[in-house]
Amino acid sequence: MSAPVATDALVIGAGPVGLFQAFQLGLQDIRCHIVDSLPHPGGQCTELYGDKPIYDIPGLPRCTGKELIERLQTQVKPFAPVFHGGHSVSRLVPQGDGFAVQTAQGLHVQARSVAIAAGVGAFEPRQLPAAGFKPLRGSQVFFAGHDPSVFAGQACLVVGGDGTAIQAALQLCDLSGPNAPTRVGLMHRRDVWDAEPALIERMRQWVREGRLQLHIGQLLEPRLQDQRMQAVDWVSSAGETHTLPCEAIWVQLGLSPQLGPLSEWGLAMQRKQLVVDSASFATSVPGIFAVGDVNTYPGKQKLILCGFHEATLAAFAIAARLRPGERTSLQYTTTSTHLHRLLGVDGR
């Protein structure tokens, strides 16, 4: 475990609302750390609709999820939030005048206040359904983002049906040298692909050339020898069962949100959402706030722009909590020299 990190505010979740929360905290002269289970900012905005257009962000008639995240990262840059990607919060308990927060990956944060902007939950890789593959995770079953070098010299199978899966299969086929995979296969339940036509055609061309094996069907169970996978059983779309030599599987089935340990932190919940006071977006535990899709209150609407409003009010409430003897006054970025100094602009 790393040495504890001390911060006035910890934001859990780096989606659009989490990033805007960091920006609004910055306007209150509060620096923060951000943790997210994904290795990069964006959350569901980039994972679920990264390349799809969004039309209801004020002042932006049209932008993609990725473009919105890029703009928000630029906006929050003056306040230099410290981002911890690939960290899933596993423990949050009151301690002293704040909270002791730990992640499953060993990060320890001592935060005076916490803003939960976890959206619909932490994103985790979708798993293979058969129970027999579970013990093989990390040794012979790997997920998106893994270094392709782990597949060197093995018979490999990529499982998935989108552009990422096709790219992964082609990448393995394109490895050269004595340690390149001996055989590469691509499996999807249907011969229907969510990818650019040119990429699909390239994949089919490599199949015709014998560089890539295409399997339309679903995995059943691994065949083990001395606790090591040597082959897999799978069923084709026609219902026929086959056995395929396989020493490693690269799963490319995308990500799914999981509420995870959040439900164990003693916060009042309603239908898997955190109950908040809509005046401050405080949860039932003083010092912990919740903004975005993770919260609920009368009249709640799950819209990004509503999350921006919630983050703004939460920032004022956090400032009042951290500085109880000071008056938290409303200032405008158009005229406030104080805000101009924080933003690093001259206001002209």
Image (spheres, rainbow, N blue to C red):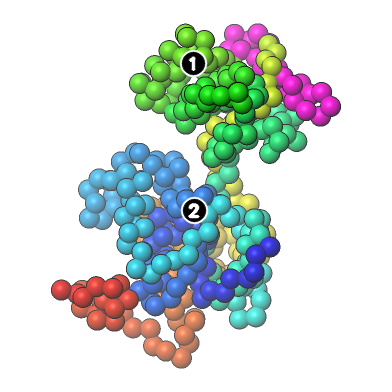
Q: Nearer the viewer, residue 180 or 65?
A: 180
Which of labels 2 and 1 is toward the front? 1
Element under label 2? Answer: loop
Q: Nearer the viewer, residue 192 or 314?
A: 192
Give how far across and how far down residue 189 sits, in percent: 56, 20
**Where is the N terminus found, in terms of image quarters?**
bottom right
Which mark is on residue 37?
A: none
Residue type pointed to by label 1:
Asp
In the visual, does 94 lie left or right of 254?
right
Which mark is on residue 119?
A: 2
The residue shown at (40%, 55%) is: 16
Query: Dot 2, crowdedness within 10 Å: few (<14), some or many (≥20)?
Result: many
- Res. 144 visible in picture: yes
The residue sitting at the right extreme is 226
Give how far across and how far down residue 263 sits, in percent: 64, 57
- 2 or 1: tag closer to the N-terminus: 2
- Tell me where residue 100 sits by quadrant: bottom right
Q: Nearer the viewer, residue 256 or 66?
A: 66
Element under label 1? Answer: loop
- In magenta, the rendered stretch is 219-241
In the visual, does 315 lie left or right of 89?
left
Give how far across and how far down residue 14 sits, in percent: 46, 56
Question: Image height check: is 254 above or below 204?
Answer: below
3D distance between C-alphas at marks 2 and 1: 33 Å
Residue denoted by label 1: 191
**Where is the C terminus found, in terms of image quarters?**
bottom left
